[in-house]
Image (cartoon, rainbow, N blue to C red):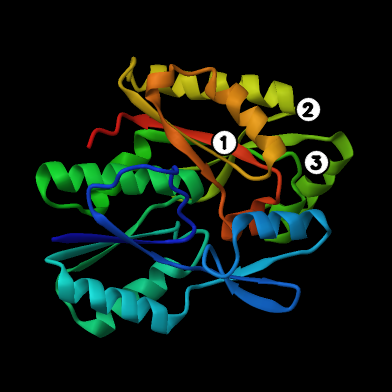
């Protein structure tokens, strides 16, 4: 038996059928002077609403005792445990999980860095499961190859939340406000947030995102042999995501996910995007 573990920075498409058991480590979210566990005691829609009302949220690592309990139980019941965390460049979750795994001393726990977050982290988990099902093992080199062969194309109408979370500099946030620049973002192969381009409107953002994604598909020579995963926050963003997904062949679309509270704390309540990558076949 193989068990996968990830954290709540991972956003998976709804109703996707998984070939292996998957456990979640909830990241913590702090808002209105309260501590919540992402996707456990705080649902994404609740945080979106609070952010739209002007609240600012911050995040923290999963609880150590939760990590320890989940890893111990998984290690005892499984031949192999693969833990795929949010990018180590965006969070210290990877270091925490590795430390706990070392303290447990189980030889069957492998901790891996997804070098991404949100819907791309979900894509990495799905593709990793496919690899384990096909060849029976998974290494960081395998995960790195998944990362290289997939692209996150993510849109946020405002830079404010990224600036508050320390993801971009003050000058860039200032000029973003001044010029009404809206960034198209990604996570690079090192796991850092990076910019693919900027636009002035949501509509131009959608068309630019389709072009960027299709250019990547062409560059990788995927032809029709690729998969697409979508994600969004508030309902108004779902209409833009639908327009974005319309740019791809329907049979390539695996599904759509809501973006979790831990991610929304950093990107804000208005965001949507897709991941395109090598086809996932369970």
Mark 3 — residue?
Answer: 176
Mark 2 crowdedness (10 Å alpha carbons): few <14, some 14-19, many ≥20:
some
Q: From the image, state whether disc 3 or disc 1 is nearer to you.
A: 1
Front label number (3 vs 2): 2
**Mark closest to the chain's N terminus, 3 or 1:** 3
Circle 1 residues within 10 Å: few <14, some 14–19, many ≥20 = many
Residue 187 appears anywhere in the view:
yes
Residue under label 1, please give it: 273
Residue that appears at 43% across and 47% down: 12
Indicate the quadrant containing the N terminus: top left, top right, bottom left or bottom right: bottom left
Residue 8: where, in percent of width, then height?
Answer: 47, 61
Could you say which quadrant of the image residue 83 lies in? bottom left
Q: Closest to the observer: 276 or 166?
A: 276
Q: Is residue 178 above or below residue 246?
A: below
In the displayed structure, 20 sits above or below 131; it is below
Mark 1 and mark 2 in contact (Cβ < 8 Å)?
Answer: no
Residue found 42% across the figure and 49% down from its top? 121
Q: Is residue 51 left or right of residue 246?
A: right
- Indicate the position of residue 187 as horizontal and vertical percent values: 51, 44
CA distance for labels 2 and 1: 17 Å
Residue, disc 2: 200
The residue furthest right is 178
Q: Residue at x 40, y 16 (%)?
A: 218
């Amino acid at each position: 038996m193989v068990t996968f573990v990830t954290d709540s920075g991972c956003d998976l498409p709804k109703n996707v059928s998984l070939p292996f058991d998957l456990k979640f480590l909830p990241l913590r979210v702090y808002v209105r002077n309260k501590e919540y566990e992402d996707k456990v005691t705080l649902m994404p829609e609740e945080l979106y609403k609070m952010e739209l009302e002007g609240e600012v949220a911050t995040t923290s690592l999963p609880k150590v005792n939760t990590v320890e309990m989940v890893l111990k139980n998984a290690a005892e019941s499984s031949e192999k445990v693969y833990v795929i965390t949010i990018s180590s460049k965006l969070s210290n979750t990877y270091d925490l999980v590795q430390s706990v795994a070392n303290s447990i001393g189980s030889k069957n726990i492998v901790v891996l860095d997804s070098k991404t977050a949100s819907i791309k982290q979900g894509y990495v988990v799905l593709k990793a499961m496919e690899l384990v099902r096909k060849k029976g093992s998974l290494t960081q080199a395998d995960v790195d190859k998944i990362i290289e062969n997939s692209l996150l194309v993510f849109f946020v109408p405002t830079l404010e939340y990224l600036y508050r979370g320390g993801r971009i500099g003050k000058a860039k946030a200032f000029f973003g406000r001044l010029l009404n620049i809206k960034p198209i973002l990604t996570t690079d192969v090192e796991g850092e947030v990076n910019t693919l381009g900027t636009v002035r409107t949501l509509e131009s953002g959608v068309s630019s995102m389709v072009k960027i994604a299709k250019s990547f598909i062409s560059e990788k020579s995927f032809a029709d042999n690729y998969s697409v995963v979508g994600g969004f926050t508030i309902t108004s963003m779902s209409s833009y995501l639908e327009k974005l997904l319309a740019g791809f062949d329907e049979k390539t679309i695996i599904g759509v996910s809501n973006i979790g509270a831990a991610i929304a704390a950093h990107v804000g309540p208005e965001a949507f995007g897709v991941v395109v990558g090598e086809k996932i076949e369970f």
